[in-house]
Amino acid sequence: MWPVWLICGVLVAVIAVGLIFVFQQDRDLRDDAPETKLPAGQDLRIALDHLVVGRLYLFSYPGDQGRQIRFVVERTDDGAVHTNMASCQACYRTEHPHHTHKGQMICGQCNEPMHRPDEKELTAEQKQCALVPLPHSIQGNEVVVSAQSILDQSRAMEAQ
């Protein structure tokens, strides 16, 4: 009788390890950058000295038909501020579940980090897995992303 119990115990252990592995992977895929929701009509204003170099800041804004428009703000090592839609063009149209992981946006279609193009490169629309730039300005000591820019960029991405 003991061999039957041994086999059952081994099977239970294997199943438990498998479940732990699956739940750990699922936890790793969730956004690791907290999302800040902006109210409708409000521009994003964030002080430059509050932006930690290399950290990805995730925001959402209420868009058309109740859809949340997600975008990111990042300050790079050279002190430059980058604002981008939190999606590549392909993921935005198909609504693949893109997410943040270890300070990067991960493409929901290919599950790889999305490239952030600089101004000298091709536009994001010409690249499959590149973040789409979002216009911003620097006013005094603040980064400003206008609510209208967020809506305009979202609508432009929907139209493509």
Image (cartoon, rainbow, N blue to C red):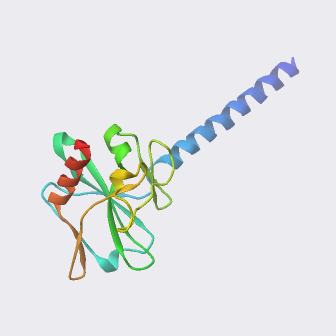
Residue at image coords 39%, 79%: 79
Q: Is 19 situated left or right of 139 in this image?
A: right
The image quadrant where one finds the C terminus is top left
Q: Is 23 situated left or right of 10 in this image?
A: left
Residue 119 pos. (x, y %): 34, 68
Residue 12 pos. (x, y %): 71, 29
Most extreme residue toward the top is: 1
Residue at image coords 50%, 59%: 102
Most extreme residue toward the left is: 41
Most extreme residue toward the bottom is: 140
The image quadrant where one finds the N terminus is top right
Picture quadrant where residue 9 is located: top right
Residue 89 pos. (x, y %): 34, 47
Picture quadrant where residue 138 is located: bottom left
Residue at image coords 59%, 38%: 22
Q: Name the residue nearer the viewer: 17 or 132.
A: 132
Q: Name the residue nearer the viewer: 97 or 13.
A: 97
Residue 140 pos. (x, y %): 20, 82
Residue at image coords 66%, 35%: 18
> Considering only vertical position in the picture, is 37 above or below 141?
above
Count every numbered label the image shows and give the total: 0
